[in-house]
Amino acid sequence: MVFMKDLFGHTCKSVFIMTVVMVLSSCSVKTLYNQLDNLIPSYVEGMVSLDSMLEKKVEQRSLLLVKWHRNTQLNQYAEWMRGLQRDISPQLTEEKIHEHIVILERFWESIRLRVDEEMALLLPLLNKAQRKELFSSIDKKNNEFREKYLELSNDERIAEYIDSIIDNYEIWLGELTGEQEILARQAATKLQPYASYRLERRKHWQQTIKHILDTKNTGSHKSTALREFFSDYNSQDNIAMNALTKNNKNIFSCLTLQIVLIMTDEQKAYFATTTNDYLRMFDELVREQ
């Protein structure tokens, strides 16, 4: 599920998304997942200082968020992974890979909608000083984003892509062969960066949220305005960015097919063992609620 990791990749949304990435790429899945109701408030506390009332509210909402995810999402992840197990075979096609990507995007959409609702409830509770601190933190993260993704030379960017691609495939297949690494390197040179569009959207998100929160409206009116903005924001169509995203998805689909069709017996065994481990842990996490 992390084949695309950051290449397909907003500050507050990452509160929960980062935990999903950890859950799907860490060998201590259960430990991390069972600590999410503590990890999320800790992450928020790193963005803005919370008074006792708001801290309690964030803890309550985090607990509900994790409960929702455990009750409604993990079984879907497991079903997706079983389908992936069935399809990773010599009969795999690019069309089938695209189907799996669409399902992953639906998972992201479900989480995004839930996190948007949590933000619409919690953000209006921030006082003036807390809002100032929050947006200062977001500014800092936007600067870090720019340094990490926009200030790279073309060669540095491609090198980052190569390392990320190889690392992500090796999570699921073990060490790649020389031929597979060559294919990964070739694919990396074709990927189109769209970080500038993402940063533009991040700043638009930040400015609009700040405007809504700085009004004299009541908390309920601010929540309504936030919900409306989130809905409009996520339905906006950035034609240029979407075109680049589509291009990159096609490159990954082609690369995945190429790598799967030349998997070694050791890689097939590694993939089966790894996915079976995740399936077992997903099942245990659901049963332990």
Image (cartoon, grey):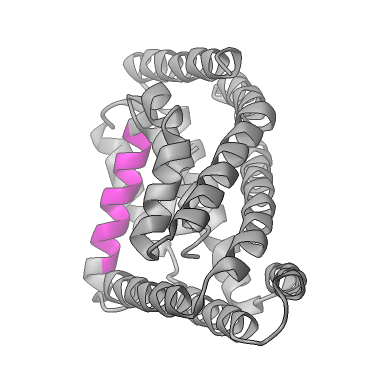
From the viewer's side, name the closer residue of 215 and 1.
215
For the image shown, how many numbered marks are present on the structure? 0
From the viewer's side, name the closer residue of 118 and 239.
118
From the viewer's side, name the closer residue of 238 and 67.
67
* Spot occupied by residue 108 in the image (x, y as percentages of width and height): 61, 48
* Spot occupied by residue 2 in the image (x, y as percentages of width and height): 45, 41
| Dominant secondary structure, magenta | helix
Residue 2 in view, yes or no: no
Q: Is residue 148 above or below residue 37?
A: below
* Spot occupied by residue 232 in the image (x, y as percentages of width and height): 75, 73
Residue 145 in view, yes or no: yes
User: Which quadrant would the C terminus be assigned to in this image?
Assistant: top right
Q: Residue at the spot x=30%, y=43% of the render?
A: 166
From the viewer's side, name the closer residue of 272 and 25.
25
> Which image quarter: residue 193?
bottom left
Residue 111 in magenta? no
Q: Residue at the spot x=37%, y=78% of the render?
A: 136
Q: Is residue 246 above or below residue 94?
A: below
Q: Residue at the spot x=45%, y=27% of the render?
A: 34
In this rendering, position of residue 237 left or right of residue 123:
right
Q: Is residue 143 above or below residue 172?
A: below
In the image, farthest residue toward the front: 52
Q: In this view, does 87 lie above or below 140?
A: above
* Spot occupied by residue 269 in the image (x, y as percentages of width and height): 39, 12
Q: Give the range drawn in magenta.
A: 157-170
Q: Residue at the spot x=51%, y=48% of the render?
A: 56
